[in-house]
Every structure is written in C-alpha cells, then in structure tokens.
Amino acid sequence: MNHPVAEAAKDDSTYAAEEEARGLAPHRVGEVVMEVRNITLRFGGVTAIRDISFDIREGEIRAIIGPNGAGKSSMLNVINGFYHPQEGEIWFRGARRRGMRPHQIARQGIARTFQNIALFKGMTTLDNIMTGRLTKMKRGLVWQALWAGPAEAEEIRHREAVEKIIDFLEIQHIRKTPVGRLPYGLQKRVELGRALAAEPKLLLLDEPMAGMNVEEKEDMCRFILDVNDEFGTTIVLIEHDMGVVMDIADRVVVLDYGAKIADGTPDEVRTNQNVIDAYLGVPHE
Amino acid sequence: MIRQEIPAPREDEMTVADPQGLANAETFPALLIANARERGQRPASREKEFGIWQSWTWQEVHDEARALALGLVALGMQPGDRMAIIGSNRPRLYWSIVACQMAGGVPVPVYQDAVAEEMAFILDHCEARFALAEDQEQVDKVLSIQERLPTITHILYEDPRGLRNYDHSTLHDYAEVQKLGRAAEAEQGPAMDARIARMQGSDTCVMLYTSGTTGKPKGVVLSHDNILITARAAAEFDGLTEQDSMLAYLPLAWVGDFIFSMGQAYVCGFCVACPESADTMHADLRELGPTYFFAPPRIFESLLTMVTIRMEDAGAIKRWLFARFMAHAKAMEAKRRAGSPLTGWENFLTRLGEILVYGPLKNVLGMTRVRVAYTAGEAIGPDLFAFYRSIGVPMKQLYGQTEASVFITQHPDDAVDPETVGVPTPGVEIQIREGGEVFYRSPGVFVEYYKNPAGTRETKDEEGWVATGDAGFFDERTGQLRILDRAKDVGKLADGKLFAPKYLENKLKFFPNILEAVVFGHERDRCMAMVNIDLSAVGNWAERNNIAYGSYQELSQHPRVLEMIEEHVRDTNRSLAEDPMLSHCQIARFLVLHKELDADDGELTRTRKVRRRFISEKFEDLVTALYSDMGEITTETEVTYEDGRKGAIRATLKIRDAETFPPAHARPTADRAA
C-alpha cells in the first residue's frame, strides 16, 4: 500500500497515535479470547506438540509459523476440537473446554479452512457457501424438505447473507459454477467464503495462500485484512510465506519440532536467533 | 431523500418550444430534470447487486445526482472544476457525471485499468480538483500519485470497503457527500437551479482522453451540443425509444460508452444496466436480454468461440442439427444479401431452424431481443459478421472517432454490407481528399484538444473539417463508405495503383489458422505475403489429422500446413478479384515464417500491430527471395528470449506461388473505379 498512514504502520504506536490525532479509531486489539495452556499431543509414540502455551486476543490476526512438520496443523486441529490433546487445557471466552466435538465447537463461533481444500466438488459455489450456514438453520428436516412457509423465509434470509459474502469475496462470476471446475486460487476463496458464512468469532485459516501465485496471494491478503477490519473477526492463520505473515499478522507464534520457540510481534520474531536457526539451519559441530 | 419538486410545464409551454422539454433540452442536467418529470417512474439505471437486479427510476436518479451535486458544491466545487471519475460501470459513477455537471464542473472519466503513471499524466494535465474513485484499489492509485498532483483537493470513493482506517481529511464517502448535499438543499438548491437554467449547449460537457497510440494522450473537449445533437441524430436513425435497454460494460472513459450509456440513454430515456462484475458480463447479458447492443469484434468473436467449443462437446444429434441449420442459415443470408426471394420450403426450414437452433442459440448469447447491434473499432471478419446476421441478430457496423462524438457513418437497416461501414449519420458531411484520406464535418466535431491548440489546428481546419487519418472511398455498388487502412500505411504499387496492406493482412487474418500476416507491395510490381500460423488452431488441426511435429518451426513448414495456407491465400485472392478497387493486389507468392512475430523482438508493437518497415529490414533476405523466383531460402534470425538473452534460429523456408484470378470487373468498370 502506498498510503502515507499505512506506511507509518511500521511502528505501531506512532501509527495509533497519528490516527487518533486525525480522529480515527485505530485498529485495537482487545482482551484474550482463547488461551492454550501447556498442550501436549501424542500419536502413539510420536509427540506432535510438546507443552505449548499461547493466547489469542480479540480482533487480532495471530499467525502460527514454523518449518515443515513443526506441528502447525496439529495445533489448529486441537483448537478446532478435531484432536484431543493428552495434556493441557484450552480456555475459550473464559470457560475451560472439555471433550467437545468439532460441530459443538463450530456452534461456539469457530470456523476454519483446510490446507487441502475440503469443498463439495460437485456442488456450486453458492451451495458450498450455503452449507456454512448450517449451524444457523433453525427449522427441522421436515420443514426444510417441504421448503415452504417459515423454512422458505429462513432460506431467503440465509441466501441474503451468502450473497453478501459472495459480493465481499468478489466471486459473483462463479456463483453457479461447480467448485470442482474452478482453479485452485478460487477454490481457496470459496472455502474462505464457507467459513465466513458461519459468521465466526474466531476464524482458523490453514495455509490460505499455499500454492498461489503472487497476484492471488495479494488478493487473499486483502480479503483476510478486510474480514478482520470489516467484521472484527479474530483470525488465527498458518502460513509458510514469511513475507505474508510479517505483513499482515499482529503477533506470531513460531513452532519447531512440536515446541514453541518464539512468540511476539513480527519484528521481534524476525530478529529472534532461535527462529533464524530453525529456518536457516545451524552448523553442526 | 430530497424530493426536489420539478415544476410541471404549463400547457402552452408543452406545445412548441419548451426549452426545458425532452426534445429541446440542451444539456445533460436539463435532460435529467426533463426525464424525471416526463418519465419519472420508468427505470433509468439497473445494477445487479447481491445476485438481484436493483433498479432506479429517472426520478430516483435525479434525486441521487442532485444530492451528490449539492454535496460537491458544499465541498467547494467551483464552476469549471474538473472531476476525474475512475472505476468500472457502476450506476453511481454514471450519476456522478451528471452531478458534476449540475455543480458546474467538468467530468473527466479515466480508464480504470490505467497504471498510476498514466493516470498521473491525465489528472495533472486536466488539473483535476476532484477525483471520484470506485474502490480501495483506485483510491490507493490516486493517493500514490497525489504528491505530484497539487490541484487535487478532494477524493471521493463509492465502495468504503477497506478504507475505514484511511486518513479522511481529503477522502470522502460518496454517500456522506450526498448526505452533505441533502443538508445543503435549502441553502444551495436555488443557486444550482439557476445555474442549470443558465447552462447552454455550447458549454463543455465532458473531457475524454484518447488512448493515443503515439505520444501522450490528448484530452478531447466535447460540448453538450456535440454529444446530444449526435446522440439524437443517431437514435433517430435507428428508431431508439424509451422501451429499449442496454448493458453498459465497456470502459466509462471510452467515448462510445459515453454516447450510448449517457447520450442516447438520456435523449431516448431508455434504461442502462450495469453488470454485477466485469466477469459476469455474459451471464448478465443473458439475463437482461437487451435490445440495443454494442461490442467490438473481439467480443463477438469470443462469444462465437464459446458456442463453437460447446457445440464440439455436444451430442451427435445436436451437432448434426447445428451443422445442418447453420449451413442453411448461411445460404439464406447469402440469398437475402443478393436480394433473391426465398422459396416456400426454404422459409419453412428457416422457421423450423428458429425453433430448433437459432432461437436457443440467441438465448444463450443473450441476443434474443436485440433490435440494433453495432460493432466498430476494427475490421470484422465477413464470416463472423455473416454468422450473427444469419441467426437473426441484426448486426451492423459504424465508423466513428472520439473527435466526432463517435458517429461518422453507420449502416442503415436495409443495406448492410460487411465490407463497408455504412452511410453518413444524419448531419455528417464527408469528403475524400487527396491520397484517399477521409475527412468529415458534423455537429459532433469536438471543441478542442485541451491545452493543445497546435494539435487542434492540425486535426481540425478552420471550416471544421476533421482528418480521420484513415484512407477510404465510397463503394460504387452500394454508395457506402469503405475504410481501407490508416492513410499513412496506404501505398502504391509500381504501376501507381492503390496498395492497402492492412486490408489484405486483415483478410488473411480472418482465417483462424493465420495468426499474423505481413503483406509487401509498396513500389513493387506484385504483392507478396509472409504468414504466421496460429499454433493453437493449427496444432489442434495437426493433432486431429495425426500430423506429428517437434516444434513450431517444423509445423510451420509441414507440406500439409503449406497446402492449407495456400488454399487460404487462394480464397483471399478469389475474393480480391471481385473487388474493383483492389483486384490488382492479389498475392502472388507467400511463405510461412519459422517464428512467431513478437513484440520482444520489435516485430510487433505492444498492442500487437505489425511494424511493417522493421520487418522488411529484419527479414530483408526473405523479401528479396519472395520477389525472386527461388523455391526456398535458408535464413538465420535473431530472437530475444523472455529473460532478455539473445539467440539465433536457422531455418529453410519454402516459398510458394499462389493462384491468382482475373479481375471480375472487366476494363470499362475498372476504369470508372480508378
């Protein structure tokens, strides 16, 4: 961005002060919404995550990075209730979570996208995003099957919400296209759309930019920032592309071999010796 | 919302010369008021948003535009201030054009895909004080060049997304400006009414920058008279009414869009719809079914390609039906053009075809209701033209320029010839001067190039005649204008006869297998051609015919490919022989080039136009060989790779003679033509 104010964002505090001086509300990060305490996850004899703790604050973009096999996706699966850690606690909105199924967690307002796109290939973009509204549907099977009266009214309401997401993500032209026919970058966008349809409080993105070209990455960055900005959604994001992470994240957690090696703002993480070693390797004695 | 009371005209005013009436309104603001009064409840704008078509009546458009205009005045717009409008086809951007005029300003639409550098030139040149940008992307672009634009004081945006945390000291939300305007109604309203009443047809209406293939863009100043008189004449010519409708999908900054979606829409009162996004144009077209449609040839071509591809995937019965009825349609179109009546059986088949093929096809293309369809901008292939006409889309050509407020000539409904561009639009005079260059004079002739009196004088003489830069002549058979080529490209054969290379090259390029062609003949006794095959088309053909090839070079010299190209050249020659003006330009010999002409090698311009002189120097050995009687030539050519490195390719090229035909018009008629 070439915006003078945005340039000032290199230094967060000056940025906020400057914005306040101009009568704007600077991007504020609120209190802790989720806390991960001493999580350890094992698959048989393999320890995927070892004693990891960090927190996620309201309204921030929190990145989890690390080399291959560092345990990033496992961490996301723990947060989203797909894996149950052997040790440790997860606190969400002041309550400790115990033994919940993923759909219960979805009801709590946590939505996610997947590293290897998990859409319904034969269904259209519109229908795929509509499935994201599932947790919001109130009418039962019978009403839905009859598709009349209150069920119809409800459907129209949900369709409206979905159309707003389609407009937001600029995918009007593929509204009626089966997603299996779409290029990879667009499928990723549809998946983000489906996650947004659940109106999440906390959005988990697993490598939203993997395999994209520069232009698609830039688009995706803009959408993530806009989601954060317009809806105030808290975002946890796993990403390989360091440039992207450093640009858009407020705080970064770095994992390596299942352990946390750094946690802080992008600038702090960038200069951390452990992180440099993990990414560039260390000479063996 | 302001419901500005529009005074109903007294009865005696309605009869003869109501200066504020629809037929007489001289300016866009006056026309908008008249439209709101006389067809206030009819739809004026449509846009698909959230998957549903939203519409606004003339009354609503008037209220929206007025609110914005008052808001602009409240922000400090002074009479004569320029406002740049940057964005895609959105109703609010169209309204802003007339709102700017109401506030006394001059709208300057800018191509939204212009890079920041280009935009900086235009905004600086027109000394814009206001800029209306569609969204964050365009706002960022304007902000990035703002330092170089000291005149810019206010930037408005239509879509607030992503702009929440921007510095709002000079940035304004469109809706907020309208709010400001509604609040200022009582204070500023009467002054604005007085200003609108004072406006005259000779006032500046809009400034449009021509893209300019050479040098910097020029700002063409057009008055309300230019636009509205031309729009009225052309609308009357085609019988457009308020019942018509169109889809506005071409760039706002292009004069054609301005005259169709603003000029003719305001004059006739028809509804202009905007697509949901640039990518949904085809789907939107199909949903709307407009009655008035304009597209450059490449759009018609891409639509046809889409149909062809889908037909190839269709079942055997459908394919058979399509082939059978398209052949019938083509034959009937030829018959109609020749003026012979159809037999009863032929009529029956045509009607059956309408039910089985043509009707559904038009529906898929979104052209079921099209009453008037135009193409312009470049030469259109006769096959493409005939395809649309044969399925019942009344396609016509027009010839125009920014400097003429578009219309110079257009086809009348009953005399359409793909070779010509039609008869002069009512009010336009045409002269063919020395060297065959076409000159015109019309009410639409532009006022001036902004801040460029020398350029103005060069283009427009004291009597108001404007040089088109195109060479052409009136066709004897139809009395319509035919455009041959850019005047500076037209040459002469050694015997002094006319030589129009681009015309010949286009004729060759209409064959899908030929990607590019370069024709030589200036100051020579015969015409020769170099041809580039189209790798995708010819490659596809080779695959279907089991022809193996290792490289582009090998494919280009394959005997069967050469045969195919020879056939195309022969067909070209055959049709040239029919042409009284150009029968002497038949191609005597040709070769197929071993490399694709490329802008990186300097053989094409960045807009893919052939640089003839450069090519004749670079491939001098080939040209010499063409004009000798050699059957083949070995050559070495330097090429530039994508990364800038240079290499050389060596090849032996076959040169073939092409069959030529005796001119169809014997001596006596050919004399007349010369």
Image (cartoon, grey):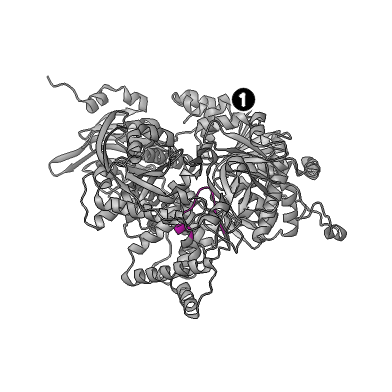
Q: Which residue is situated farthest in the top direction here?
A: A285
Q: Position of residue B151 (x, y in %)?
A: 64, 27
Taking depth in this image into account, of A64 and B560 the one nearest to the observer is B560
Taking depth in this image into account, of B362 and A122 the one nearest to the observer is B362
Is residue B48 visible in this depiction of the protein?
Answer: no
Q: Secondary structure at mark 1?
A: loop
Q: Position of residue B617 (x, y in %)?
A: 38, 32
Q: Amino acid at mark 1?
A: Pro
Report the residue marked by disc 1. Answer: B150
Q: Which residue is situated farthest in the front direction here?
A: B667
Q: Indicate left or right for A54 with B1 as reference.
A: left
Displayed quadrant of residue B56: bottom right
Residue drawn at 59 percent across, 26 percent down: B149
**B497, above or below B325, in the image:** above
Please state the extent of the stretch shown in magenta in the rendering.
Answer: B373-385
Is residue B204 visible in this depiction of the protein?
Answer: yes
Quarter the C terminus of chain A occupies: top left
**Chain of the residue that carries numbered disc 1 in the rendered image:** B
Residue drawn at 71 percent across, 46 percent down: B443
Q: Which residue is situated farthest in the right direction here?
A: B12
**B359, above or below A55, in the image:** below
Does residue B321 belong to the magenta stretch? Answer: no
Q: Indicate left or right for B59 with A280 as reference.
A: right
Taking depth in this image into account, of A11 and A171 the one nearest to the observer is A171
Q: Residues within 10 Å of mark 1 (few under 14, many from 20)?
A: few
Q: Indicate left or right for B543 with B342 as reference.
A: left
Q: Position of residue B466 (x, y in %)?
A: 65, 40
The number of numbered badges drawn on the structure is 1
Does residue B375 belong to the magenta stretch? Answer: yes
Q: Position of residue A176 (x, y in %)?
A: 41, 59
